[in-house]
Image (spheres, rainbow, N blue to C red):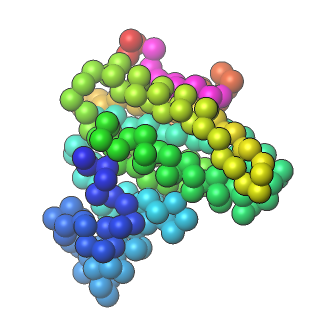
Amino acid sequence: MFFKSFTLAAAAGEISTELVDIRFLFKAKTYKEFILSCFDELTEIPTRRGFSRLYNFDKVKAIAVLDIDDFKKVNDEYGHDVGDIVLKEFATRLRTLTAGTMDLFICRWGGEEFLAICEYDGSKNDVIEDFELIRKDVEDFDIFYEGKKINVTITIGISFYKKEFSLDDFLKEVDSFLYNGKEAGRNRVSYAIEVK
């Protein structure tokens, strides 16, 4: 399972040096320092910086952006400490949902936004269905804090591989699909209509 290798536990030596860009490795004082610099301390998954250092873009088949809906309301209503709990629980849930079922590299792209790089053997519709299952599971998942139940939803944008696409092209398209999903009411999976 590709995804399982990319957790903070990798700092204990689970990630082989064959998986990382050796140029960055030499800049760190130790291998552990290098790995820790690539991971988000709160969610224990790679950061945007970690994505650029740990992932081989040549393998990508699809990119998805998962964004927690109305996350600012969580911070405003419950405080930033609870917001951090929501982010951590969401990342943990994401790892649980994808373990053994999807070949994903997941990182925290920024704030409440997470990026998923897909490697898959199935059809595009299979990928869409898998992300729809993730969306539904998050919608039904309860987070508890001091006796209060907090529910969040996510909007997901998906962009599929095109031979002429650069990484920037991928990211621009997936952002546009995420925006379309938000504009259409949130809590949905958004992608190119012609996929189906």
Quarter of the view holding residue 111: bottom right
Is 36 rendered above or below residue 103? below
Q: Position of residue 185 (x, y in %)?
A: 69, 24
| Magenta stretch secondary structure, dominant | loop
- Does the rendering let one see residue 164? no
Residue at 38% in and 41% down: 98
Q: Nearer the viewer, residue 143 or 30?
A: 143
Q: Which residue lies most toward the left here?
A: 18
Range shown magenta = 186-193
Q: Which residue lies most toward the bottom here?
A: 29
- Counting every numbered tag in the picture gives 0
The verdict on residue 187 being magenta is yes
Q: Which residue lies most toward the right here?
A: 77
Residue at 69% in and 39% down: 151
- Does the rendering let one see residue 147? yes
Residue at 24% in and 66% down: 15
Q: Is residue 145 left or right of residue 39?
A: right
The verdict on residue 188 being magenta is yes
